[in-house]
Image (cartoon, rainbow, N blue to C red):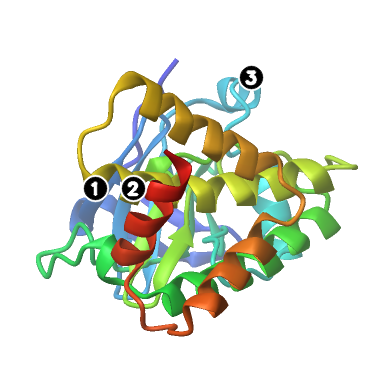
Amino acid sequence: MKKNMPKEVIFYGDYDRSIKISELEKIGAGHDGIVYRYNDDYALKVLKYNTQERKDRNLMTFDKAIYLKENLKLRRITNPKDILLDTDGNYAAYMMDYKDDVIKADEYRDVGNFTCGDLLSSVFELQEDFAELTNKNVLAKDINRGSYIYTNDFLYLCDMDKYEINNRGCEDLNKRALNFVIAKLLYYEMLKNGSFDNLQMRQLANWVKKCANARNFIGELDREIVEIGDYKYPISEYTKQKVKKII
């Protein structure tokens, strides 16, 4: 059951600080919460469901938010930075770093116009982040296209709500999740290169699946870009050549 959304939230551990939701700019919404911009640097996600339903749906519970806030130092994944309560003292929201999405913004920029160097920089930092998740027994889950944020320094991931904590032995699954993130990004760019028939679409989907399960997908991606010899080579051109090799 969706609960009534609070009109005001208070910082956990700093009860003198509060935020009136009506004064914030709404920047996004999903099935589990509404996201607002707070000041210039933060995004505030106000949660919809009650405590039990968040547990049942594996959403962002209080314990999970606290764990992700206190145990992770990430560069490319926006994890909780602060926890907030409603005026009755119930867990109601969490705060994360705000990332300006230049793909959705007024100054629209196409993903393909970024460079292969931009891609690799993001990939290597995400690789470090996913290793950090594994070291802290956190399993990345439910990453989809809506989880991607493209800023001026390229790719970030948001929405850790369905990540699982205390998941030991998650290394292989996290590696596959990261491979899938990168392969699916390239897949979306490949689709911009024309119309594909059903067979070709299956070939591209199978390529994504193969990449997700490959042990050295990121190493091979790095090697291919090094062979191009130009880190300023546009991603659009890279995917245009890549799709020809796949189909």
The image quadrant that residue 216 belongs to is: bottom right
Give the Cα distance between marks 3 and 2.
Answer: 37 Å
Would you say the residues marked 2 and 1 are in contact, meaning their CB atoms lie under 8 Å apart?
yes
Image depth: mark 3 or mark 1 in front: 1
Mark 2 Cα within 10 Å, few/some/many (few <14, many 20+)?
Answer: many
Q: Which residue is mark 2?
A: 190
Q: Position of residue 81 (x, y in %)?
A: 56, 64
Residue type, mark 2 in image:
Met
Would you say the residues marked 3 and 1 are in contact, meaning their CB atoms lie under 8 Å apart?
no
Q: Residue at x 58, y 39 (%)?
A: 60
Q: Residue furthest left?
A: 106
Give the Cα distance between marks 2 and 1.
Answer: 6 Å
Q: Which residue is mark 3?
A: 56
Q: Position of residue 159 (x, y in %)?
A: 49, 47
Image vertical order of residue 52 relative to residue 245, above or below: above
Mark 1 Cα within 10 Å, few/some/many (few <14, many 20+)?
Answer: some
Earlier sequence position, callout 3 versus callout 2: 3
- Judging from the image, what secondary structure is the residue with disc 2 in? helix
Q: Residue at x 45, y 49 (%)?
A: 245
Residue type, mark 3 in image:
Asp
Q: Residue at x 64, y 42 (%)?
A: 212
Q: Is residue 163 visible?
A: no
- Judging from the image, what secondary structure is the residue with disc 1 in? helix
Closer-to-camera residue (2/181) = 181
Q: Which residue is mark 1?
A: 193
| Quadrant holding the N terminus | top left
Mark 3 Cα within 10 Å, few/some/many (few <14, many 20+)?
Answer: few
Q: Position of residue 154 (x, y in %)?
A: 39, 70
Earlier sequence position, callout 3 versus callout 1: 3
